[in-house]
Image (tube, grey):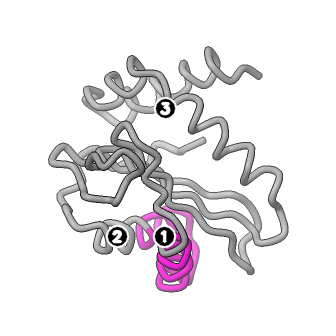
Amino acid sequence: MVQKSGVVIDLQLTDKLEAIGSMARFVCSVNGLDGAEEVANRILEREEMMSTGIGYGIAIPHARLQGIDRLYMAVARSAAGIEFNSLDGLPVNLIFIMISPANTSTEHTEVLSALSRIMSYEEVRRSLLSAATPDEFLDVLAKAEDKYVGP
């Protein structure tokens, strides 16, 4: 799902708009994509319809965009938490940003569904919050994907 270069273990932002802007720049930067401002704007448009703060300290801001060739993801962890207008009212500690081509809804929906399923397990969330390195973080994600989503 996420590459090692796409993991931020210690996001220092506490504002939702700043965090989305920062994550949009980050996902574009690590994947060599242009248009970070457009990515941020599209995600913010999506946020206006309904918060992507799904609860349990998780947010999955996402958008479909013209001009990209595949799905891209990055993740950041905030120890302090970010007010995200989440469904359960709790601050967000893990932000998974996802952008995908405008014309591919199946993969976009499947990844959102798998990520939501994985994040519904408390032991996974707890392990991600305590991971010391990006490698450890990705190892937790990979094991959870194998266990709860399957091949």
Label 1, label 3: how far apart the Cα atoms are: 20 Å
For label 2, the residue is 22
Residue that badge 3 annotates: 119
Hey, what amino acid is under mark 2? Ser
Q: Is 126 placed left or right of 29 in the picture? A: left
- Numbered range of the magenta stretch: 24-47
Residue at the image point whose x is 20% and y is 62% from the top: 13
The amino acid type of the residue labelled 1 equals Glu
Residue in view at x 75 percent, y 68 percent: 101
Return the x and y of residue 135 as percentages of the image width and height. Answer: 40, 31
- Dot 1 alpha-carbon crowd within 10 angstroms: few under 14, some 14 to 19, many 20 or more: some
| Image mark count | 3
Secondary structure found at label 2: helix
Tell me how far mark 2 sits from mark 3, CA to CA.
22 Å
Kindly report which numbered mark, 2 or 3, lies closer to the viewer in this rendering: 3
User: Disc 1 marks which residue?
Assistant: 47
Mark closer to the chain start, 1 or 3? 1
**Rounded to the nearest whole Å, what is the CA distance between mark 1 and mark 2?**
15 Å
| 11 to 142, vertically: above or below | below
Which amino acid, by three-letter code, is at mark 3? Met
Q: Is residue 63 left or right of residue 90?
A: right
Q: Is 28 placed above or below 55 here?
A: below
